[in-house]
């Protein structure tokens, strides 16, 4: 089985999303993935990266974030490595009420909820001073 891998290293700034999208687009094209899988991959990556940049670093603290995306048979494994404040994203937030109105919902948690809805698994761990988040998307 051939493994298709793409590694993207970016600064911890939201402006780097363009670079991330470009790398993910290359990965999607090289693997012949559907638009549905592409959209899910983009959404979970953007959500995890955005939360990391917004909440993981004090103002002005720079870091390099490494995003690795790999196709392994019928799954995509997304791994994010950073040196931000430790935060465990492996536990899904409470699901919004089924009758909740999007315009009146509390802010926060919906993106991470969607990450867990799309992913087969989400794991977080600490390796020394590094956070490692691994997510598996089924194809």
Image (cartoon, grey):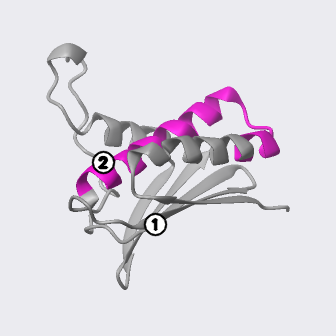
* Residue lying at 73% horizontally and 44% vertically, measured from the top left: 26
Q: Which residues are magenta?
A: 27-55
* Residue lying at 54% horizontally and 38% vertically, measured from the top left: 42
Q: The C terminus lies in which quarter of the figure?
A: top right
Q: Is any atom of residue 88 visible in this view?
A: yes
Tag 1, which secondary structure? strand
Q: Is residue 139 left or right of residue 89?
A: right
Residue 100 within the segment the image draws in magenta: no
Considering depth in this image, is 62 or 68 the residue closer to the camera? 62
Considering depth in this image, is 105 or 100 the residue closer to the camera? 105
Which labelled disc corresponds to residue 5? Answer: none
Residue 47 in the image, given as x and y percentages of width and height:
40, 42
Residue 54 within the segment the image draws in magenta: yes
Residue 98, by quadrant, is top left
Asked if 4 appears above or below 84 in the picture, the reply is above
- Residue that badge 1 annotates: 64
Residue 97 in the image, given as x and y percentages of width and height:
20, 24
Q: Pointers 1 and 2 in contact (CB under 8 A)?
A: no
Residue 16 in the image, given as x and y percentages of width and height:
48, 48
Q: Residue furthest front?
A: 60
Q: Residues within 10 Å of mark 1 (few under 14, many from 20)?
A: some
């Amino acid at each position: 089985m051939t493994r298709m891998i793409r590694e993207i290293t970016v600064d911890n700034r939201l402006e780097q999303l363009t670079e991330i999208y470009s790398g993910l687009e290359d990965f999607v094209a090289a693997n012949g993935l559907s638009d549905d899988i592409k959209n899910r991959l983009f959404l979970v990556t953007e959500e995890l990266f955005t939360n990391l940049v917004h909440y993981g670093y004090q103002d002005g603290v720079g870091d390099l974030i490494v995003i690795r995306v790999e196709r392994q048979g019928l799954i995509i494994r997304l791994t994010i490595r950073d040196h931000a404040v430790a935060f465990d994203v492996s536990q899904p937030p409470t699901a919004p009420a089924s009758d909740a109105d999007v315009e009146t919902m509390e802010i926060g948690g919906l993106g991470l909820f969607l990450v867990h809805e799309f992913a087969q698994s989400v794991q977080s761990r600490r390796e020394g001073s590094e956070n490692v988040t691994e997510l598996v998307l089924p194809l």
